Image (cartoon, coloured by chain):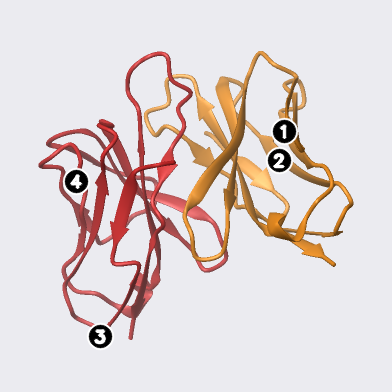
Amino acid sequence: GEDVEQSLFLSVREGDSSVINCTYTDSSSTYLYWYKQEPGAGLQLLTYIFSNMDMKQDQRLTVLLNKKDKHLSLRIADTQTGDSAIYFCAERASGSARQLTFGSGTQLTVLP
Amino acid sequence: EADIYQTPRYLVIGTGKKITLECSQTMGHDKMYWYQQDPGMELHLIHYSYGVNSTEKGDLSSESTVSRIRTEHFPLTLESARPSHTSQYLCASSETGQPNTGELFFGEGSRLTVL
């Protein structure tokens, strides 16, 4: 079955880079996503990567995909206090009837 | 910006009450979903719908029920709320046509507390 795992917590200093990691089990994943959830709010899509790509960069965000190891990472450059939130990794498997499988979320805390 | 709305945002009720959480989207999406989010963060799919008059149960068993009479509306109902139903409920929708990235658009959530 599909399974997505993330570490639960990450703390970084303001201005440093943050790297949030995710592993998944379904080799038929077509798209992989990073969502951000701020306190008391719903999830907002940050970025996504198609499974035939190794890397995607969007301003301060860099997504790296290692299909061989089924490992996805999100790097946030120059992390700011406004980046403090929960970050969810999610995958969409080919032909999946349930659309997306989410990880448990990583709580990112940015320290001043 | 996503056009998907949930009401109420916050609800505190007593045990045994019937409640309905509303979810509406104006994007014309056929697919809609309800997720339950634990206090510790994890999301669990409890219901989904692929269109009008189509509803399916998700991965996590839930005593709630849903209906899909109109494309834009996907309400969730608990006939008799219990403290174990205390949680955050997130509604989402997605496109059906191709090509699409499979992105889910989320509402702001409904936080339910049952005393």
**Chain letter corresponding to the colour red:** B
Q: Looking at numbered disc 4 in the image, what kind of residue is underneath it? A: His
Q: Residues within 10 Å of mark 4 (few under 14, many from 20)?
A: some
Chain of the residue where label 2 is placed in the rendered structure: A
Name the amino acid, label 3: Gly
Identify the disc placed on residue B73: 4
> Which chain is disc 4 placed on?
B
Q: Nearer the viewer, mark 1 or mark 4?
A: 4
**Chain letter for the residue marked with disc 3 in the picture:** B
Q: Colour of chain A?
A: orange
At a point 10% along the width and 42% down the height, the residue shown is: B69
Quadrant for residue B115, please give it.
bottom left
- Which residue in the protein does label 1 denote? A72
For the point 75% across and 61% down, the residue is A81
Residue tagged by mark 3? Answer: B14
B19 above or below A17? Answer: below
- The quadrant the N terminus of chain B occupies is top left
**Residue on which disc 2 sits:** A22
Q: From where the camera sits, is residue B4 visible?
A: yes
The amino acid at mark 1 is Leu
